[in-house]
Image (tube, coloured by chain):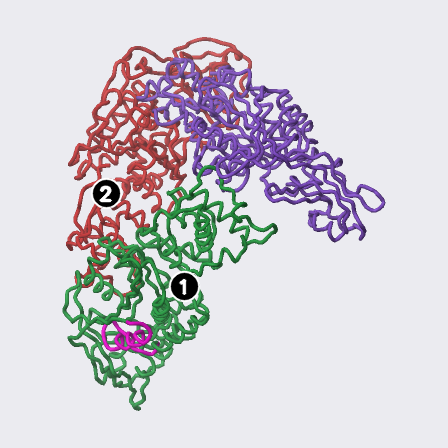
Chain colours: A red, B purple, C green
């Protein structure tokens, strides 16, 4: 069996990946980076509008006051302008320069106040004096500015004019979803939060990656249906779960994506189940990536996997990131900007997700049709050419492992893990052995 | 939620511990240290008498000749005096100076004998020439003296007068027990051996610690009933088991204590079951103690856990020690004296047992009443104040873990282990969440 | 209990081992080393003839063309002579000097050819230029010589006369088997391949070791029946399995042996089951051997365990070797000669197999007849003499472990593993406790 035989089936993985996917994702992330998002408001709508230029996104609006499990959709927040002026009329802090300058959900204010009073409404990072922090106060009415500590220290004792031209009114929470229909109704859920303002990695990177994944998938045949959810963190995921409670049973695998554009990690936090196929598939992809991944057991703090993995749902949903949230100095600061993410990192993250999809789609159980002793490979042209071709040697081992373990009790992923071979190779050799009549497919593996 | 909320439930653990408990235990150990105990006789009675000054101890006398499983209660041994005199009439070995000088259960003797003859009846420790060994011969009639090897080497070749004024007659085996009645008949067994003569750590320390634990518990409400057994090693435990065979089924957790006053270890030897709640509870306490404990799997050699864990009983009883028996030079020698134990070590040992009791008493299964998505903690005042208070952060994590894992399949100890948080914190946060209606108690955990 | 008590039962292991077994095995290996074996032909018959001088071997002949599962018995290959002559008539390569010079199953040839043409039919080892490689072409008609690369490089550009006086004709595949009848029909299978020409370790060593094991066993009473199979690799094992398909269910334990005469390893590759008694027994023997064994999980590449462990059979058969195949420079070269194997290594390998048989034969479940508390060992004379005799201490621990774990759920091997004591000691102490009435045998352990 030559290399060409092994590779002659165009894998889903190969169809999902394009040459320029990293640059495409970066460009979209850069496009949505300046938008001032929050958990509600026009910033979310504008972001979903950009996504909708690539995929047939369905946008949902849920009115303020709607009960979603233990929560209630809050009032909608929008902001037009904000600044702090000194006595000379200079804008020393200007929302137009960075939307991080205003604490998200700040109530409107227009006042002249003393430095002492102003200081009660300012957040800084003393340990990172050049950076603006990202702060929110969704459920407690308040207002505040965020600024570099260095600037804060230099503030004169004078009277300041502060303006936050925001509104907090009955309105809607907005989220978008896109469903790629596969051969079955079993679903794979991909979820990214769209509530952070100008933070490039967290989570313009995740939003953009999923948009291109959905866009690429649109033209392909898949076994599973794929649902892409772009929603505000926490309240958005809770809203979606509340409105789709009964159909969550269709979700067989799922991933939350955030911070996929930096060069750290990659990091995978397992689903609460801990050994779901999505956990095994992503860990398998990571182990064969040539990178040095960090695998974390589930813990109930983080992104929207908190909701998907709450005990009443316990969905098989993990969290994929590059650097781990909270573990890097750029996290939730103005340093999480477009310089922090790179197209090559985005491309690598995208490929890891494509590898994972390849495992999920290909996972199946086969049975050896000649289980007593080894079948004679030579007479079927399945023996490797003489010589030390490493791929041929690995393909031969894949063949022997498949024949030995295809007893109805081991799936392709089981075999790939046991043989320590890439799933893609095990899967393509399985197709070859099936063509030769040595394997028969027992069942797909819906989990 | 501030720190005060977390700590406002006075835990059983706190009620068990007193400021001076280490000194109290040391004083009692020192009081009983000089008494010449053996597996029978007045030394045991006198020791139980001292214990009885603190707790309402019930003393049992079992006649010589009584069958207890494969064993028979031996004759009772008592001793009044013993010495070796040289030709000048000097007592070169004197029982009055150390009761270790006479092998326990030595038969009476009064003779004049040559050095050669005498040497056949002397035990020394050539590798520890300054120390007197501790020796017994319960089931083979014999007599012997124990002495420092240094002194033994200097013995002159002359005629010696040896006296052992002992008696070995029909009598009784004596043991004491104290039962603290809890809300249920399910029992926790604490057992210490009272058969060793002047050995401070082994086991005056254990006897004294258990006496103070029982004394302190007397005033408290507990879920379990607590049985404290003070009995001679091996034959005493066997006697108690033979006389209480049917009620052993009440024992849900148990510990043998010995050598709890030195600064080594701590050491925990698991019950034969290996993963009983007592094993997990004590290991949990040790892991959060700041010490570097040694955890041993069960093995059928040691103290009375040998009997409790014999296959016909297989009770969930482990062994708690500081240094491991046999692993220290002082073991079974005159160096195991009052200088070897210290009140601060005794206090630490006591607190570890109190921590363990706290786990056993508090262990329960709760269910999240709002299992679908996370409940909104903020509107219930359960969110931590802004800032880096480490205890608040841990308490918040405890809250999230409790909500996530309280699905009926995980107990508080399961959650504490998984979250790597002290049981006391998990337990008190569970009470808080129960008050807020977010958790409901499914059942206590009787094991 | 003194040492003599422990050792007074002459173990099967002791009966299997003789003083000179290493030299005996070496001598037989040396005797069969020069024979030119292949997967068929007179070399196999001659080898089986030598084995038959020691044991009552039954030889089977299976005709060319017979179907055995997916395979067909090939034509029989024999060879009388082969050489390459240069223009001066000198035999520069001569089959008479080493049968490795001819690729096994080379078709007949007698030609005068150019150097260029000759080179297409020569195998060498450029990285080991002094050694002749071992090559075969069973299922593809071809002819070739094998030679040292050093010599190959010095070949002159001239006309060579090549002769391979072989025949490839309808005939038979030949294998031999010997059955030692035990008390039951449950079988232990030992299998060695007899298809390699002059390779001393691979596998004259294995063939000779099994011959002496069978010879020694002939006089002994055993619980199991022992089947010794000497067959060509792959096709021989497949043939045996095809002809004995229904009786394979009798095989309770099995080992493939090859390369047992060098000083490497020892190496054990587990059966596909992974935790069969044969796996545990051999690993136990290795762990108490004083050597530093390598334990490998099953993988579907290697010797005839590939066939025994194919999924349709999944027999509990492992592979025992010293050095791991393929992992040493001598593998499949002329350096695998009689200098590479030594009688002391052969003796050690033999003893390890004898230890393993001892475990399999002795494995049983006993029950403590006095499971409540410990029985009184002293009154039965079972207590060790005072003093530090290490064997007595180990024997005492064996006694305590046996009494503690003999609850019907633990076999002797379970206990030996848990106690970390040699099976032979645990087994002999079990016999002693049985004599004393403290243990009763519940059942043998057929697996």
Question: C136 and C256: which one is in front?
Answer: C256
Q: Is residue A246 visible?
A: yes
Residue B165 lies, in percent from the top left, at 72, 37
Specify the quadrant of the image occupied by residue C138: bottom left
* Chain under numbered label 1: C
Query: Distance of mark 2 from mark 1, alpha carbons?
Result: 39 Å
Q: Which residue is mark 2?
A: A363
Q: Which residues are magenta?
A: C33-56
Q: Magenta stretch: residue C52 in it?
A: yes
Q: Secondary structure at mark 1?
A: loop
Residue A425 lies, in percent from the top left, at 26, 50
Question: B273 and B437: which one is in front?
Answer: B273
Q: Magenta stretch: residue B247 in it?
A: no
* Chain under numbered label 2: A
Question: B431 and C434: which one is in front?
Answer: C434
Residue A194 lies, in percent from the top left, at 31, 25
Q: Which residue is mark 1?
A: C322
Q: Secondary structure at mark 2?
A: loop
Side of A49 relative to C419 (left or right):
left
Which is in the foreground here, disc 2 or disc 1? Answer: 1
Residue B257: mark? none
Q: Callout 1: few (<14), some (14-19), or many (20+) C-alpha neighbours within 10 Å?
A: many
């Amino acid at each position: 069996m030559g290399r060409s035989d092994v590779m002659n089936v165009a894998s889903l993985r190969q169809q999902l990946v394009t040459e320029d996917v990293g640059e495409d994702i970066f460009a979209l992330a850069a496009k949505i980076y300046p938008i001032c998002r929050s958990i509600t408001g026009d910033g979310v709508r504008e972001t979903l509008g950009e996504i909708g230029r690539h995929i047939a996104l369905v946008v949902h609006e849920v009115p303020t006051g709607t009960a979603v499990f233990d929560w209630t959709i809050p009032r909608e927040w929008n902001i037009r302008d904000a600044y702090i002026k000194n006595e000379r009329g200079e804008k020393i802090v200007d929302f137009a320069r960075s939307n991080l300058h205003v604490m998200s959900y700040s109530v409107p204010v227009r006042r002249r106040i003393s430095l002492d009073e102003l200081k009660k409404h300012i957040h800084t990072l003393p340990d990172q004096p050049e950076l603006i922090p990202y702060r929110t106060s969704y459920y407690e009415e308040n207002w505040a500015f965020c600024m570099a500590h260095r600037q804060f220290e230099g503030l004169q004792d004078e009277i300041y004019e502060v303006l936050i031209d925001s509104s907090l009114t009955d309105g809607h929470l907005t989220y978008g979803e896109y469903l790629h229909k596969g051969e079955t109704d079993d679903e794979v859920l991909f979820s990214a939060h769209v509530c952070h303002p100008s933070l490039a990695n967290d989570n313009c990177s995740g939003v953009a990656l999923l948009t291109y994944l959905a866009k690429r998938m649109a033209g392909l045949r898949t076994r599973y249906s794929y649902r892409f959810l772009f929603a505000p963190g926490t309240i958005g995921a809770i809203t979606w779960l509340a409105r789709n409670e009964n159909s969550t049973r269709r979700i067989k695998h799922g991933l939350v994506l955030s911070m996929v554009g930096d060069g750290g990690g990659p990091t995978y936090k397992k689903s609460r189940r801990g050994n779901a196929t999505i956990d095994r598939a992503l860990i398998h992809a990571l182990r064969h990536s040539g990178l040095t991944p960090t695998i974390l057991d589930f813990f109930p703090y983080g992104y929207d996997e908190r909701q998907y993995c709450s005990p009443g749902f316990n969905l098989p949903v993990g969290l994929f990131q590059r650097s781990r949230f909270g573990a890097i100095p750029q996290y939730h600061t103005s340093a999480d900007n477009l310089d922090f993410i790179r197209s090559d990192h985005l491309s690598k993250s995208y490929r890891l997700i494509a590898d994972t999809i390849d495992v999920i789609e290909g996972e199946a159980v086969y049975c050896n049709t000649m289980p007593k002793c080894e079948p004679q490979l030579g007479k079927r042209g399945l023996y490797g050419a003489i010589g030390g071709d490493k791929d041929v040697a690995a393909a031969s081992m894949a063949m022997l492992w498949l024949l030995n373990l295809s007893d109805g009790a081991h799936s392709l992923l089981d075999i790939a893990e046991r043989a320590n071979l890439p799933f893609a190779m095990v899967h393509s050799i399985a197709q070859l052995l099936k063509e030769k009549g040595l394997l028969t497919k027992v069942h797909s593996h819906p989990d």
